[in-house]
């Protein structure tokens, strides 16, 4: 039975184990049943699903996932939380807790062993400092994923779903939109957490594209070009790429590539769509192979 969405029960567990919040792990535990139910609903978890939970904390959302899913694997980095999780999840036989850094876990092997290689669902309440490496790690390693439903800082959620020409648009927006369809499903105020963070949060669902939405010959080169064009936002795209050592073209050749794309040579990276970055990558690769 799910009990930890109730703040009183959360406090009892923390006191029982004399738990101290670790700033280095960015720990903020959810204490709002409405939000917890909303996350499970947004993730579309059914009794057929294998779910990977990142950062279960004391098991608050894990209890909800266990009620809804066929099987749950929860990966927790903080050793102090492992005995607490063994206690709070003792009523469930469909969950395994792994004490590990998620960036070191072989998720492909997990998906193969636990779900026959079929796409898995990922659910997480992510510490703000590590949101981007975790999301990009999941996508770039080509783990079979159906969707990722995550609680992140509101500003980061906004960044994932915006388009060209906005101040939040950047490499993260393009990377997420290349791999998935992002959709903010819930806004979550600081009062829903213990301890309260200083900023608002949001739950965003990233539904994996069956096929990537653009034609690009060299995915790695495209992302290098994207990163180079946003590294120095105030510079023109031509200058940003000219300063990037992995593009072995002179400034004039880079300008020719940009002209071939059909945009002004003075354009900045933040004005280009994902499709344009893919096309530019193909043009640059052709020119480098020359």
Image: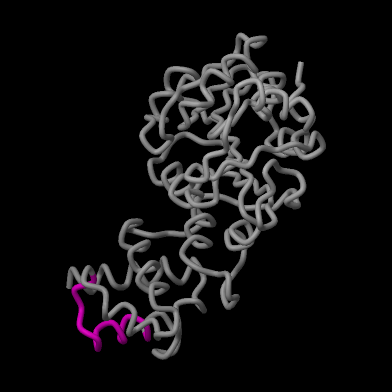
**Nearest to the observer: residue 100 or residue 235:** 100
Q: Position of residue 37 (x, y in %)?
A: 78, 33
Q: Give residue 39's quadrant in the image.
A: top right
Specify start and end residues of the magenta stretch as a single range. 247-259
Quarter occupied by the C terminus: bottom left
Q: Position of residue 82 (x, y in %)?
A: 51, 21
Q: Is residue 158 above or below residue 188?
A: below
Taking 264 as reference, is 33 left or right?
Answer: right
**Can you give x and y, in whole percent of width and height, for residue 191 in the image?**
77, 48
Classified by dominant secondary structure, the portion drawn in magenta counts as helix
Residue at 52%, 71% (x, y): give it.
273
Frontmost residue, 178 versus 213: 178
Q: Is residue 152 above or below residue 17?
A: below
Quick check: 186 left or right of 90?
right
Q: Position of residue 38 (x, y in %)?
A: 77, 38
Image position of 68 with respect to 285: above or below: above
Residue 194 is drawn in which quadrant? top right
Residue 251 sits inside the magenta stretch:
yes
């Amino acid at each position: 039975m799910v009990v930890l969405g109730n703040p009183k029960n959360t406090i009892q567990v923390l006191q029982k184990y004399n738990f101290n919040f670790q700033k280095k792990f960015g720990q903020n535990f959810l204490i709002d049943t409405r939000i917890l139910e909303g996350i499970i609903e947004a993730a579309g978890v059914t009794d057929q699903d294998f779910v990977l939970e990142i950062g279960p904390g004391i098991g608050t959302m894990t209890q909800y996932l266990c009620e809804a899913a066929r099987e749950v694997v929860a990966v927790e980095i903080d050793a102090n939380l492992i005995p607490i999780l063994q206690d709070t999840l003792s009523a469930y036989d469909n969950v395994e807790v792994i004490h590990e850094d998620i960036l070191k876990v072989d998720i492909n092997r997990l998906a193969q062993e636990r779900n026959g290689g079929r796409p898995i669902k990922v659910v997480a309440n992510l510490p703000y400092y590590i949101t981007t490496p975790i999301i990009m790690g999941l996508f770039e390693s080509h783990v079979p994923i159906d969707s990722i439903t995550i609680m992140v800082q509101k500003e980061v959620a906004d960044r994932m779903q915006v388009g060209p020409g906005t101040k939040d648009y950047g490499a993260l927006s393009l990377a997420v939109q290349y791999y998935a369809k992002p959709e903010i499903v819930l806004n979550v105020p600081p009062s829903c957490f213990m301890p309260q963070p200083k900023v608002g949060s949001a739950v965003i669902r990233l539904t994996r594209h069956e096929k990537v939405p653009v034609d690009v010959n060299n995915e790695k080169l495209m992302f290098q070009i994207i990163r180079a064009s946003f590294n120095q936002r105030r510079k023109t795209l031509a200058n940003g790429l000219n300063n990037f050592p992995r593009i072995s073209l002179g400034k004039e050749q880079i300008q020719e590539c940009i002209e071939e794309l059909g945009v002004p040579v003075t354009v900045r990276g933040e004005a280009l769509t994902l499709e344009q970055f893919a096309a530019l990558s193909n043009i640059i690769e052709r020119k480098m192979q020359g």
